[in-house]
Amino acid sequence: MDFGISVPNCVEGMAFPIPFAGHSDVVRVAQEAERLGFDSILANDHWSTQNYVRSAFPDPPRYYEPLIMLAHIAAKTDTIRLVTGVIVLPLREPVLFAKQVATLDQISGGRVTLGVGVGAYREEFEAVRPALAGVARAELVEEGLASLRVLFSDRRASYAGKHVQFTDVEMFPKPLQDPLPIFSCGNAAGTMQRAVTYCDGWMPGGLPRLALAAGIERIRALAASTGRAGHFPVLPQLAACLGTSQAAAEEAFARSQAHEHLVSLRRSTMRNVDMTSFIAENLIGTPDEVIRRLRLVREAGADGISGIFFAVNTVPEFLAQMRLFATEVMPVLKAA
């Protein structure tokens, strides 16, 4: 299995308290992830503070723009992959976004994996792009993905959609990777369909194992029905909290800001998911228990974890959890 760490660039007030991590802390986490042998780091994307975060904290969170942060990290690392998850595509103008991604892939030596999706918070979309408040965000994602494909592949790219249009754009250099891997992020049926139609894989977020297994079965059947040969990768995101005992890990998770964040997602990306227990369905427990749960995730059909976000309240706790996971959990799953 492959393992990626979700770096704390855009998650203060959500998965972590305010304040949590400055930009130098984000780089430190990425460098430590590379040193410990993690396969990738994953950067989230937010432009404005969510309502529930504003009501919970007196100060605003620091949301570092993911592509700029990943470019900074690329200059300070050598091999670790740079993953976005999730870039909120309805907030982005496709031509500029394609240019930014291509540049990042060039300067990083072809280390980019692009995860895109609708985004969890409609209020954020409406705050940033009020003129499009009545537009279905799924339409913007679909047109954005179609736009990226022609911009990355065609010498002279044109696209005429309902919401996105450009003509005779000669965008060079293209991404170093050909093709650059793009993952569809999210849990909805439309996300799975877009994964098969436009993307190279699926990146669900926090799904229970039974729902994950059903989704993997469905998405690979969709891929086969459209004539897509070969393996279709699936890399979910999950929370983790390791402890010396099951009770200690569960107690730490329950009092973390990450738990509060997952609860908030019941109103958005998790609203149609049958989630009986966040503790039971995430990587919570002793290293042996986390290994057992990861084996179940692998048996469900997942190829790895794209973004592990540790349920902690300080950066030193985050680094300690990373080291414990890397020394006690990863070697067992990598060897299997």
Image (spheres, helix red, strand yellow):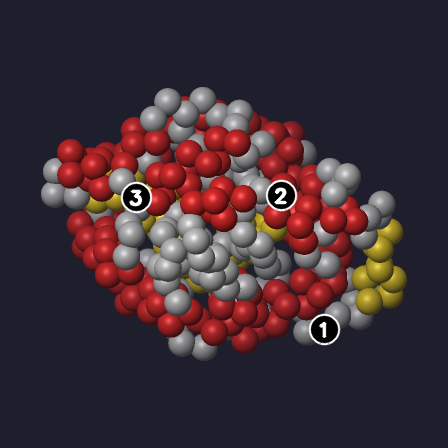
With respect to residue 64, does 268 lie above or below?
above
| Nearer to me, 318 or 96 | 318
Q: Residue at coordinates 30% horizontally, 29% vertically from top-left? A: 280
Query: Counting other residues with Cα less than 10 Å from the Cα at mark 3, is it few (<14), some (14-19), or many (20 or more)?
Result: some
**What is the C-alpha distance between the residues marked 1 and 3?**
45 Å
**What is the C-alpha distance between the residues marked 1 and 2?**
35 Å
Give x and y (percent) for residue 165.
84, 55
Q: In this rendering, does residue 279 appear at all?
A: yes
N-terminal of the pair, mark 2 or mark 3, is 2
Compared across the picture, whether 225 is left or right of 319 comes to: right
Q: Which residue is mark 3?
A: 256
N-terminal of the pair, mark 1 or mark 3, is 1
Q: Secondary structure at mark 2?
A: helix
N-terminal of the pair, mark 1 or mark 2, is 2
Give x and y (percent) for residue 219.
56, 32
Query: Counting other residues with Cα less than 10 Å from the Cα at mark 1, is it few (<14), some (14-19), or many (20 or more)?
Result: few
Name which residue type carries label 1.
Answer: Phe
Q: Residue at coordinates 73% horizontally, 59% vertically from top-left? A: 93
Name which residue type carries label 3.
Answer: Ser
Comparing labels 1 and 2, the label whose residue is closer to the camera: 2
Q: Which label is found at residue 62?
A: none
Q: In this rendering, does residue 216 appear at all?
A: no
Q: Which label is found at residue 123?
A: 2
Q: Residue at coordinates 64% horizontally, 33% vertically from top-left? A: 190
Q: Which label is found at residue 172?
A: 1
Q: Secondary structure at mark 1?
A: loop
Q: Are marks 1 and 2 in contact (CB under 8 Å)?
A: no
